Image (cartoon, coloured by chain):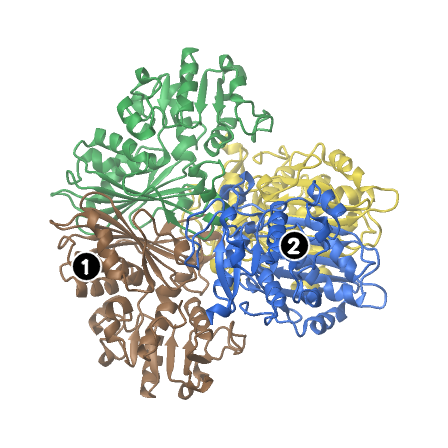
Chain colours: A blue, B yellow, C brown, D green
Amino acid sequence: MAEQRIKAGVYGASGYAGQDVVEILSKHPCAELIFATSSTYAGQEVPFTSLSYIPPEQAPLDQVQVVFLALPHGVSAQVAKQALDLGVRVVDLSADFRLDTPELYREWYGHAHPYPELLPVPYGLPEINRDHLRDVKLIAAPGCYPTTTILGLYPLLKAGWLIPGRPVIVDAKSGVSGAGRDPKPNLHFVEVYGNFSPYSVGRSHRHVPEIEQEIRKIDPKVGTLIFTPHLLPLDRGLMASLYVELADGHNSGEVQALYGQTYGDEALVKVLPAGQLATLKHVVRNNTCAISITPATERFVLITSVTDNLRKGAAGQAVQDFNLMFGLPETMGLM
Amino acid sequence: MAEQRIKAGVYGASGYAGQDVVEILSKHPCAELIFATSSTYAGQEVPFTSLSYIPPEQAPLDQVQVVFLALPHGVSAQVAKQALDLGVRVVDLSADFRLDTPELYREWYGHAHPYPELLPVPYGLPEINRDHLRDVKLIAAPGCYPTTTILGLYPLLKAGWLIPGRPVIVDAKSGVSGAGRDPKPNLHFVEVYGNFSPYSVGRSHRHVPEIEQEIRKIDPKVGTLIFTPHLLPLDRGLMASLYVELADGHNSGEVQALYGQTYGDEALVKVLPAGQLATLKHVVRNNTCAISITPATERFVLITSVTDNLRKGAAGQAVQDFNLMFGLPETMGLM
Amino acid sequence: MAEQRIKAGVYGASGYAGQDVVEILSKHPCAELIFATSSTYAGQEVPFTSLSYIPPEQAPLDQVQVVFLALPHGVSAQVAKQALDLGVRVVDLSADFRLDTPELYREWYGHAHPYPELLPVPYGLPEINRDHLRDVKLIAAPGCYPTTTILGLYPLLKAGWLIPGRPVIVDAKSGVSGAGRDPKPNLHFVEVYGNFSPYSVGRSHRHVPEIEQEIRKIDPKVGTLIFTPHLLPLDRGLMASLYVELADGHNSGEVQALYGQTYGDEALVKVLPAGQLATLKHVVRNNTCAISITPATERFVLITSVTDNLRKGAAGQAVQDFNLMFGLPETMGLM
Amino acid sequence: MAEQRIKAGVYGASGYAGQDVVEILSKHPCAELIFATSSTYAGQEVPFTSLSYIPPEQAPLDQVQVVFLALPHGVSAQVAKQALDLGVRVVDLSADFRLDTPELYREWYGHAHPYPELLPVPYGLPEINRDHLRDVKLIAAPGCYPTTTILGLYPLLKAGWLIPGRPVIVDAKSGVSGAGRDPKPNLHFVEVYGNFSPYSVGRSHRHVPEIEQEIRKIDPKVGTLIFTPHLLPLDRGLMASLYVELADGHNSGEVQALYGQTYGDEALVKVLPAGQLATLKHVVRNNTCAISITPATERFVLITSVTDNLRKGAAGQAVQDFNLMFGLPETMGLM
């Protein structure tokens, strides 16, 4: 039985997203974790496994069928190329393959894309893009803010109910693990404790172009994103509060039903009943996105969309992508 | 010297706002705390003083010149009336005198206002209403959400720069002390810890009519409030993220200067330099409001306004009102 | 297959320990949850299941083979009796059956034991008492402090290495969920946040007689317990720091090996390698106890023992008891 | 008036202890802050002042009468020497002058003491050593663990009530600010959040020799220290739980009175009434030490001693030392 499992490696496995990929894979009935890399913690035990972290350059790429890359952008593309050249499939959790064009990548990441010939890459948001993820070699798993925001907007975008050109306001709040495990002054416990702070506001966060690219594919007339991320004093969980305005002919009271229909068959997106409000406790440590709808005025709607930034916002979704990539049941190991 | 101090009593002094009123008064050079009431903690020591809490019905109203009421709405109006009849001045921190008409009060609080003849009462937001607070007998100190929101909007409202009739979006986040000290299931440590949750969303929070009443006095053409309060997993601090749209002829790049001019002389409102962002650490445990301005698009602006909900949002502001009421320097005891 | 599952009910299922019993059972391959009671939340959804909470008096006792009682002491004994009379087995998480004699129960709980004829009841600490738990009708699952303390002391007690009569010092720290879900003033978020506080110190905590009773069974010459519980500002996790003195002929350097031998075959007790220190992160959300040993002087040893107070300290251990009771593999559903 | 103020400089002013020195001095009626150094934050505003941080090498030492050194050990001694040579007095918050002999310093800090001729230096614990702090040129301000531990033990040590040679058990818990502001992996918010962990246990922490040196001066027969520090998931506050055994002829019931007598005249040490327990909330953000006494058995006593590690455990005590050094009222600026 174990021989039939899909052999997987995880790069960047000691980071927060990497740790969750390992944890999920360790309980996945059709995956077998072969290696987990970490430059910083090489030699130490890998939680949930009997492995030790190895340096990335020692990873036995030829012994696996797939790798998960939880690496910094720039680094990730290099390893992806190396893996693909060996016939190893790749689920990339970095930003390296999320933007469709090398021009956009250069604009936001400050250097040329190393492998523009690989672009565009299927965007791994299964609820929207499932049909393009089956049996592919490379998937770009979305970031946590984009996942939470796009899933929150998707039914309205798809139905074309938003006023063309009106800005979409996204007031977002993320737990600290979203900022990574590297020690930085602003992530010191004492700095975060008792504080709540915005950062990269307006249109400066690197997730803005990723979100805009994807929502425009669904509704080309959607307006500009106004995106305000904040740092919450907790470890995991992400909320996107979405303020949108409906076009003529639509009423905020109809939105609840639209969401129920759109997501009725989705196992990992829960539309809460009218009157209930999405909170982080709905999603922390599970692999779902929860959404609540609040009509604010006749034409304005508040959509509250929440995920665990390390699960549906990163590792859980990466495994969901992996399941699609290998033809497994989509939610295997995730329920 | 001590004889010349203004003799004060505090009702509801064991609640969170009441505790801060006591702490501030204990260090105020021109105030002398005569009594502090608490039904629940009667007999126990009052921190920062040599007093013990007394039951409210034992309070020696005839020995003070002023009382601060940090009581539940409904109860507060009764004590206020009693004090006023004895010639004792009142700074009321409850909601009982904030709404200008008995009709509005009944609509939002579910019972008739007990003393409609006292309405309207001067609204104790000094930066906006200073001239109506000097030497008066009764002041309605504003709530924490209204203070933070109105101060954040005031320069734009006063200048008339907002598009008439467009909704004003307020995504607000408050520390738990804003919900009071009474034990409730949703305030249990375990329920709040690691969570972040919206409540009373849309237009259902009781601070909505208070805010709308006041902002319409400044700009009668201002649109509807869309108000989303959230509970932050920390003890004190409040942020209002305000999304507004400018009318023709105005540009988001001009807003920074407008705020600088409007608040240039204010000791307790700090407009942060362009590029800096307001966080809770700017205001927790002090008596100021801090505001940052972020142009989001040419016409949309994000205003981030923060206070300590127990200080500039409650007790600090009440003492600021007291200073004005008695002709003392406005910031005495608050810097 | 489902027909062969053991049908179980959970009383007090909305409390923190009860919630974890439900969660573990929902994933247990040989258990089927038939009902979950809650007086406070009757009618609401039971997380991890498709059930709704029912009032305890409506529980269909005749449809289950076993009940888990996560009820207040006093109440629990009543339901246990009722179940046993119907032939339903009982794993009791309350204190009602932990003390061996009615006299001790009356001394610590202030009222007569309602069913003294049921005492003594097998004490459900499998690592120590496994042989008395197989196929029994009623098990008294230990409290969180006793589990963590007794497991931390067991190898030394069993080996008889402690100086007879010397006090055993237990400086213990617990997350807030150990205090239950009922809202109380001292459990309000604002009271706990940023604080750390001892309570029921000296020898006044109700877990003292339970611990002393059990450790004396292992080593009758063991000294008095000096027990200091503290409240940690976090949701779950419990640490017992045990300071003990070795008798002549024993050296603190030998203790590590003793613990390794004693617990070498235990799946749910992990003795950390010398030099590593037990922390809450070792155990939170899993069903193990982790122990580290630090020789402090030649004769004094610090044992650091940690559990998740809701798992190995309550629900996880109750399911371990259940597994033994029904002849299932002891760690089923717990790894 | 301002001319008569004592001109002071603070080195290491952006660290957590340094920040609190600056805050206290900014409100001190007889001190004037002339400069505040920071290598990392040079150029940025110094909170509570109108100054900007300057690099340490630009500090105008010739313009001040005293410097506070909140620097790493090793660095601190260099600046102290430089200041003393210029006739500037020094309150040193580092460990450089706390150990009385160069031999002990080398043993614990791994390098030779640079200025052994300056040793021993008066140890700045005023409640014990007040008479040796008046009008001196250099004071070694104690660490946070030593302050809290020694004040907790002092009355028993001074009275000679402890059994000679018996170990003193100190189970200590500190907020994260005690570990400094430098970003380190183990101080990352996510690592600390929800965790509680011992570190440097047994007799390995660098505060052990400092504590033992000082308690032996008070009671030369006192036993070995068994010292277990833990990291609490909060920003500030320190508790030392002290377990001690009384010699023949003394009873744990007499200890409360002994402490009341010993500390009866101390403004900054509060002995709580019998039955009350010291918690962090008693001391956070003030300059006191609070102590509670619990008789555990006839001969064993638990002393719970708490401070704010940045106040009475660092900055507050340094200013108390400064007051003594310059003949000012000892608690000036600290109440």
> Residue B148: image x %, image y %?
66, 47
> Residue B236: image x %, image y %?
55, 48
Instruction: Give whichever of B225, C94 is nearer the camera.
Output: C94
Going 42% across and 23% down the picture, which residue do you hit?
Answer: D76
Image quadrant containing the C terminus of chain A:
bottom right
Whether residue A293 sits left or right of residue A237 in the image: it is right
Helix, strand or loop under label 2 = helix
Amino acid type at mark 1: Leu
Say which chain tag 2 marks: A
Amino acid type at mark 2: Tyr
Q: What's the mark number on residue D184?
A: none
Mark 2 burial class by Cα count in 10 Å: few <14, some 14-19, many 20+: many
Q: State the residue position of label 2.
A: A145
Q: State the residue position of label 1.
A: C157
Going 48% across and 44% down the picture, which residue do you hit?
Answer: A40
Q: Which corner quadrant of the image does residue B333 belong to?
A: top right
